[in-house]
Amino acid sequence: MFAENTLTESMDEVRDFLLREREKTLSEMEWRFRARGYGYNLRRIEAGFEVARLPQNTVLGTLRV
């Protein structure tokens, strides 16, 4: 998926991108909405957030926030 306008499969790059986006938002809901706009689905789990690529909803990894 795209992170910083480049196609990537690297969870490290995706994590860095999503955490930078989190800093720009006021709430978790807004952050999740922005992530969906970039093609990522964030689902809250016990360990943090599960990150999936849309539209297939393919799980890429977990963010511990």
Image (cartoon, helix red, strand yellow):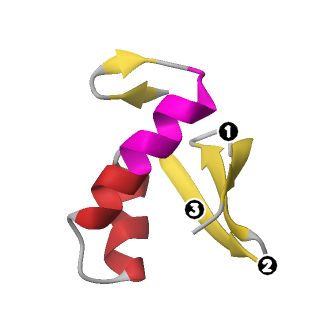
Pointer 3 residue: 42
Give the side of residue 36 with respect to residue 52, left or right. left
Q: What stretch is highlighted in magenta?
A: 9-18
Pointer 1 residue: 56
Spatial CA span between label 3 and label 2: 13 Å
Of 17 and 41, nearer the camera is 17
**Marks 3 and 2 close (CB-CB < 8 Å):** no
Q: In this view, does 10 lie above or below 59?
A: above
Residue at 50% from the left image edge and 19% from the top image edge: 8
Nearer-N-terminus badge (1/2): 2
Query: Alpha-carbon neighbours of circle 1 within 10 Å: few (<14), some, or many (≥20)?
Result: few
Q: Which mark is residue 35?
A: none
Give the side of residue 12 with respect to residue 28, left or right. right
Q: Give amino acid for label 1.
A: Gln
Q: Is mark 2 on a helix, strand or loop?
A: loop
Q: Residue 12 location, x and y as percent?
A: 56, 33
Q: What element carries label 3?
A: strand
Spatial CA span between label 1 and label 2: 23 Å
Q: Residue 46 carries which label?
A: 2
**Marks 1 and 2 close (CB-CB < 8 Å):** no
Give the side of residue 32 with respect to residue 57, left or right. left
**Mark 3 or 2, closer to the camera:** 2
Q: Is residue 16 visible?
A: yes
Q: Would you say residue 63 sits in the magenta stretch?
A: no
Residue at 29% from the left image edge and 28% from the top image edge: 4
Q: Is residue 17 above or below residue 8?
A: below
Q: Residue 48 location, x and y as percent?
A: 67, 70
